[in-house]
Image (spheres, coloured by chain):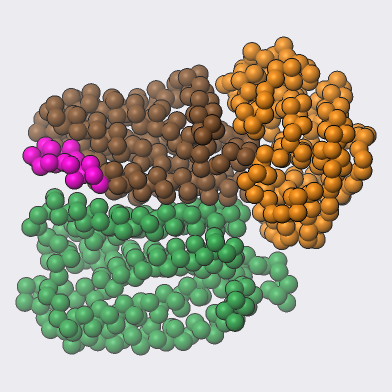
Chain colours: A brown, B green, C orange
Amino acid sequence: MAGFSLLLRRELRIAMRRRGDVLNVLVFFVIVASLFPLGVGPEPSQLRAMAPGVVWIGALLAAVLSLPRLFAADYADGTLEQLLVSAQPLPVLVLAKIAAHWLLSGLPLAIVAPLLGLQYDLPGDALFALMASLLLGTPVLSMLGAAGAALVLGARAAGALTALLLLPLYVPVLIFGAGAVNALLIGINPSAHFSVLGALLAVSSLIGPWAACAALRVALD
Amino acid sequence: MLYKLASPQAFFPVAGTLIPWFGALAAALALAGLYVAFIVAPTDATQGEAYRIIFIHVPAAWMSMFLYLIMAGWAGLGLALNTRLSGMMASAIAPTGAMFTFIALWTGALWGKPTWGTWWVWDARLTSELILLFLYLGFIALKASIDDPLRADRAGAILALVGAVNVPIIYFSVQWWNTLHQGASVSLTRAPAMAMTMLTGMLLMALAAWMYSIAVSLARVRNIIQERERHAQWIQA
Amino acid sequence: MLETMALACERGGRRLFSDLGFALGAGELLRVRGPNGAGKTSLLRILAGLTRPAMGNVTWRGKQRDWDFGREMLFLGHAPALKDELTVSENFAFNCQLSFLKEDANALEQIGVGKLAGLPARFLSQGQRKRVALARLALASSMPLWLLDEPFSALDEAAITAVRGLIEGHLREGGLVVLTSHQEFPLAARAERAITL
């Protein structure tokens, strides 16, 4: 597992020197969430009902926006090739990349989300549920996202293609993530939703890295 | 013998001879199915004649899901055994699968309008079909965006397999989402009670669609073979 | 130790080479020659396990290559594999640790980029980047098989001499080297083979 921490540390070090990339994703998230009221009107009860969905969709879009960069730079400068020929197990390296992606996009989003929830006048326990659902759900976005990013390496129009490939696969996380907060808002216990989110995380942890490794080998063939 | 058929060169003429048979079967089954749909099945008490579109809507939906799994199966086979023909079959099936998804969506709209007054309802089946359409389009788009055909096949196969695992998860999620939000409102899944005649009609149409899909996929794979193997000796002969 | 049989390669629908077979033993050098686009890099990538050959196979120590092959093989491709945002020493340290090599800053000195150790890789010239990538050779004597794609390109005379020295040292100690190069430099080896694609 030395390879995991080695690559994770490198990714975080690079991100610290390119802080703009991380901030861009956060700002995008905030802007998207702020656009919805401008589009649908400021009626408080309507906004409160929309809030979980809006914040979650913002998180999906932010993920899809940040994913093409996961492997693209390494592919271009030859470091990806070195990762594949090294004796380090590729799944471990891919998990390190996924962990870095989550720490730099999913986790910040989950932390900022309650502030957006306040903009939509969500009550306290809903804010907490919103953050919890994102903490549990954004890793799923990163796991599946790695597979998507690896599949479009070297393909034309990678950005739009990533969105087309990943957004349908993100539907279950969206339904149960936003659903957890919606349930709380109408007085239902969201524990079932959180259980399903946990199950989705477990399933995606198997599929995502496997598919990403296979796709990376295809891309570097 | 099956192993011999795995080469595009051997499969090409076999596919050619099979196409007219499947086409004929498709036509015959479709005639039988439409006969049941429009002549034999009685008019529905609540929905009148408009419900007959179910004989196209439901088989199309079944085929769209079935074809996705078949397509993923071929793709997975190609990935595991490194056979060129398997990837070509997956590419051949995809457009037909997407077409049936589109038909299911379109007939769903045509059913909804006279029956409940709206062109679209967010019921579980239609929503799942919509997402399935995106999965097909994603597969086709990914393959189209990679220039090298072998690489495109392998990348597409990975995507198709990931999609295939997700299809039941997506379906379950959408079902759940629908029951929570829709409650007792309109649903295309709650068709008029399933009489024996109706089931027969739908099965006939589904089989017709299946035969049609095979015929069309075989024709399409012949085109793909011709294009990909165009430098090979046997094509140029 | 390294053997191939009936190796064939197809790229973009074209067959680049077929029925390629050779055997390479300890202390031996294999030069791969040919014009641009002939498949030299593809052959190296097949040997490294990155690319699947259209036909044929590669064996290492008489067996199919497995996990451990990565420990015994050093592959340096065209691209220097440096991250722009990291310094030379950070890049070097990462590449060494990735290959389970003990990093030693002297290696950077040896190849002439010691003074640049604290500089972000973004500021380096092509030749300097190449030298940082090649610095690993000084530490990689524990990896028997070296696959080097155009190791001399973009290097000045001093660097070329240094790299030649490293390659010859490795061959003397019983290592195997496969390299592609447009330039012909004499290299002392127990035996030398050549393939022209």
- Which stretch appears magenta? A179-196
Name the residue located 47 percent from the left edge and 38 percent from the top edge. A95
Residue A42 showing in the rendered view: no
Q: How many marks?
A: 0
Where is residue A179 shown, x and y percent of the image? 19, 43
Q: Viewer-proximal residue, C97 or A166?
A: C97
Residue A67: quarter of image: top left
Q: Is residue B227 above or below residue C97?
A: below
Q: In the displayed structure, would residue C111 be above or below residue C47? A: above
The secondary structure that dominates the magenta segment is helix
Q: Can residue C91 be seen in this view?
A: yes
Q: Where is residue A201 in the image (x, y as percent from the top left)?
A: 33, 43
Does A114 sit above or below residue B49? above
User: Residue sitting at 40 percent across and 44 percent down?
Assistant: A205
Residue B39, quarter of the rendered image: bottom left
Q: In this view, does B101 lie to the left or right of A88?
A: left
Q: Check if residue A43 falls in the magenta segment.
A: no
Q: Where is residue C164 in the image (x, y as percent from the top left)?
A: 86, 29
Tell me if B103 is positioned left or right of B183 in this view.
right
Question: Who is closer to the viewer here, B38 or A45?
Answer: A45
Q: Residue at x 77, y 39 (%)?
A: C144
Tell me where residue A40 appears, x and y as whole percent.
18, 35
The correct choice, above or below, for A179 with respect to B127 in the image is: above
Q: Is residue A195 magenta?
A: yes
Instruction: Specify the quadrant of the image occupied by residue C168.
Output: top right
From the viewer's perspective, tell me whether residue A101 is left or right of residue C142.
Answer: left
In this image, B212 relative to B201: left or right? right
Q: Which residue is drawn at 52% across and 37% down?
A: A93
